[in-house]
């Protein structure tokens, strides 16, 4: 398989949801017991979105390990550190000054170097909170962040409707740096950004967060908020658009962020099959047992006996 053969990449937001955590993937996507999760994941999907970097800059050693454990053609997208995009959240959680320094920029870039050198960095995900509205100071702030990371492909997630109300300002700001706008599927409110299902920038980047309306702002945990399984029928309307966009842009990423109990995996599998991108590597039987909705797709399923050589 040649390097960068696949421009259409479908995966999940994160790959590691430990057995001690609510909504664990163990026994559902991953077989029970000790599993080296990233290689297992990368045998079935060609990309993953790293969210741990939102909480702390990536350590180069970890990034080298990620690169080493994945196939040559695998790609990571990396979520930008919250100090850049959520300064209030950063200050509240750390008690530290949220003012971004050149050292912060350099530290984050250093953590990306292993992925850049191995050609496994797909793009940088720059996600802002729903409260981040279009205003002169915020446009300047966005421009400043894009300037820091202008040497990397970037996809920007803006969620407040002011960014679509002033679409030209938004697109001009992104285009100055060759950045792309993230398309998001999530519960819609009167302040939600309005989006057409089309590329804005050189990358089409779709993040599907689930539609758990009742728990969106009232959930007791992040896991509960993303406890939502898209039905096969709910995914159908996306397929014609994705097939059309495939011919309009060089890079297309789809990430499922409804991570509770590997629902993201089930939906990523559904989308791949609906787009005629089957997965040859077998899945642990727990995925089909948890999500019988997958029976309409011709997955290769293996049980404990097959995986561990038991009779």
Image (cartoon, grey):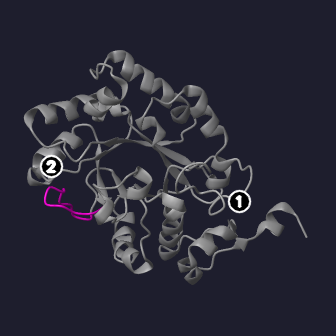
Instruction: Give residue 73's position: percent from left, percent from top.
Output: 59, 49
Q: Hey, which residue is sitting farthest front in the picture?
A: 220
Query: In percent of the image, x 11 and y 31: which residue is there?
Result: 137
Q: Quadrant of residue 296?
A: bottom right
Q: Which mark is residue 163?
A: 2
Q: Is residue 276 left or right of residue 307?
A: left
Q: Characterize the local packing of mark 2: few (<14), some (14-19) or many (20 or more) Cα atoms within 10 angstroms.
A: many
Which of label 1 and label 2 is nearer to you?
1
Magenta segment, which residues?
186-197
Q: Which residue is mark 1?
A: 31
- Quarter of the picture containing the C terminus is bottom right
For residue 192: magenta?
yes
**Nearer to the camera, 54 or 61:** 54
Query: In percent of the image, x 36 and y 75: which residue is there?
Result: 240
Q: Main secondary structure of the magenta part?
A: loop
Instruction: Give residue 116's position: percent from left, percent from top.
Output: 51, 34
**Nearer to the camera, 19 or 46:** 19
Q: Hey, which residue is sitting farthest right in the picture?
A: 311
Q: Which mark is residue 247?
A: none
Judge whether 255 appears above or below 169 on screen. below
Judge whether 58 appears above or below 52 on screen. above
For residue 278: magenta?
no
Q: Quadrant of residue 141?
A: top left
Q: CA distance from mark 1 to mark 2?
A: 43 Å
- Observer able to see residue 290: yes
């Amino acid at each position: 398989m040649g390097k960068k053969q696949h421009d259409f990449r479908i995966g999940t937001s994160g790959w590691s949801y430990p057995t001690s955590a609510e909504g664990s993937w163990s026994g559902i996507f991953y077989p029970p017991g000790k599993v080296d999760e990233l290689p297992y994941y990368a045998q079935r999907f060609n990309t993953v979105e790293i969210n741990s970097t939102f909480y702390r800059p990536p350590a180069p050693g970890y990034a080298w390990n990620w690169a080493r454990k994945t196939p040559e053609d695998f790609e990571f997208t990396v979520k930008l550190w919250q100090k850049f995009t959520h300064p209030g959240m950063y200050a509240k959680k750390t008690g530290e000054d949220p003012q971004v320094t050149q050292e912060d920029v350099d530290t984050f870039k250093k953590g990306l170097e292993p992925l850049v050198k191995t050609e496994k960095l797909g793009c940088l995900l720059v996600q802002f909170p729903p409260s981040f509205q279009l205003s002169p100071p915020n446009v300047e702030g966005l421009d400043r962040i894009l300037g820091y990371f202008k040497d990397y492909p970037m996809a920007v997630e803006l969620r407040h409707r002011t960014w679509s109300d002033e679409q030209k300002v938004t697109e001009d700001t992104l285009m100055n740096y060759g950045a792309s706008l993230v398309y998001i599927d999530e519960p819609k409110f009167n302040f939600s950004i309005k989006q057409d299902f089309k590329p804005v920038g050189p990358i089409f980047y779709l993040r599907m967060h689930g539609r758990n309306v009742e728990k969106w702002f009232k959930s007791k945990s992040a896991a509960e908020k993303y406890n939502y399984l898209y039905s096969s029928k709910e995914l159908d309307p996306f397929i014609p658009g994705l097939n059309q966009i495939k011919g309009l842009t060089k890079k297309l990423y789809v990430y499922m962020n409804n991570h509770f109990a590997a629902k993201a995996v089930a939906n990523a599998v559904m989308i791949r099959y609906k787009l005629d991108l089957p997965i040859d590597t077998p899945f642990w039987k727990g995925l089909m047992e948890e999500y019988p909705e997958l029976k309409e797709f011709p997955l290769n399923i293996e049980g404990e006996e097959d995986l561990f050589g038991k009779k």
